[in-house]
Image (cartoon, rainbow, N blue to C red):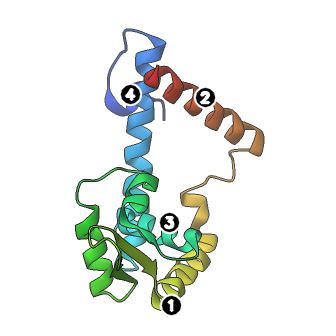
């Protein structure tokens, strides 16, 4: 469905249309992903934290996690507290500087991510449409990089 039809609107320019379409599509895909993650008792930001920690392979600082988050959030510490309560990550304070806090994914967190990976493979078409060729996906990614560069300039 075209964005004009989805939101019953006309746009003053192709650029405005593209930005509205980007935001609409991001929210649409995000809602599907949130629904998927709820099956595992997670929110999308919590999953993002687990993904970051799995990728790190070792303990990293809370600030490093915050820097790597896809969606920046002022409540990252609260999100981590919930993951600690679930036994999915652990937290330790730096012995040299009590202001520095390290976090690490637990085996339970790794096991949960493995389950999510398997289920994602089964249902991945909902999130990454197979109709989007590698070439088109690269083009889309390149255009998004250009957009971010324009906004940052």
Task: Looking at this view, name the residue that lies furthest to the front.
Answer: 96
Upstream in the sequence, badge 1 or badge 2? 1
Residue 117 occupies quadrant: bottom right
* Of the pair 44 and 6, the residue shown nearer to us: 44
The residue indicated by pointer 2 is 143
Side of 117 where 136 appears, left or right: right
Secondary structure under the numbered disc 3 in the rendered image = helix
Q: Determine the CA span between mark 3 and mark 1.
A: 15 Å
108 sits to left or right of 58: left
Mark 3 residue crowding within 10 angstroms, few (<14) / some (14–19) / many (20+): many
Q: Is residue 33 left or right of residue 143?
A: left
Which one is earlier in the sequence, the residue at label 1 or at label 4?
A: 4
Residue at x 43%, y 20% (from the top left corner): 17
* Residue name at image x 46 percent, y 55 percent: 68
Q: Give the residue furthest to the top.
A: 12
Q: Which residue is mark 1?
A: 107
Residue at left 55%, top 74%? 54
Instruction: Tell me the SS state at disc 4.
Output: helix
Q: Residue at x 70, y 39 (%)?
A: 138
Q: CA distance from mark 4 to mark 3?
A: 29 Å
First in sequence, mark 2 or 4: give its number: 4
Q: Mark 4 = which residue?
A: 20
What residue is pinned by disc 3? 52
Comes first in the chain, label 3 or label 1: 3
Within 10 Å of disc 2 (Cα), the crowding (few <14, some 14-19, many 20+) is: few
> Vertically, is 88 above or below 59?
below
Query: Which mark is nearer the camera, 1 or 4?
Result: 1
How far apart marks 1 and 4 lie (CA) works out to 41 Å
Q: Position of residue 110 (x, y in %)?
A: 53, 84
Q: Looking at the image, is 6 positioned above or below residue 41?
A: above
Q: Quadrant of residue 58?
A: bottom right
């Amino acid at each position: 469905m075209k964005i004009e039809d989805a939101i019953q609107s006309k746009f003053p320019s192709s650029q405005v249309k593209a930005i509205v379409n980007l935001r609409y599509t991001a929210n649409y895909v995000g809602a599907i992903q949130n629904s998927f993650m709820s099956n595992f008792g997670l929110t999308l930001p919590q999953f993002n934290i687990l993904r970051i920690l799995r990728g790190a392979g070792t303990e990293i600082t809370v600030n490093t996690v915050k820097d790597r988050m896809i969606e920046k959030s002022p409540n990252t510490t609260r999100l981590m507290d919930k993951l600690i309560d679930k036994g999915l990550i652990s937290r330790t304070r730096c012995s040299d500087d009590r202001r520095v806090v390290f976090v690490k994914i637990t085996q339970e967190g790794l096991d949960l991510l493995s389950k999510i990976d398997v289920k994602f493979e089964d249902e991945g078409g909902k999130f990454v449409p197979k109709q989007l060729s590698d070439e088109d996906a690269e083009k889309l990614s390149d255009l998004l990089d250009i957009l971010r560069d324009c906004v940052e300039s």
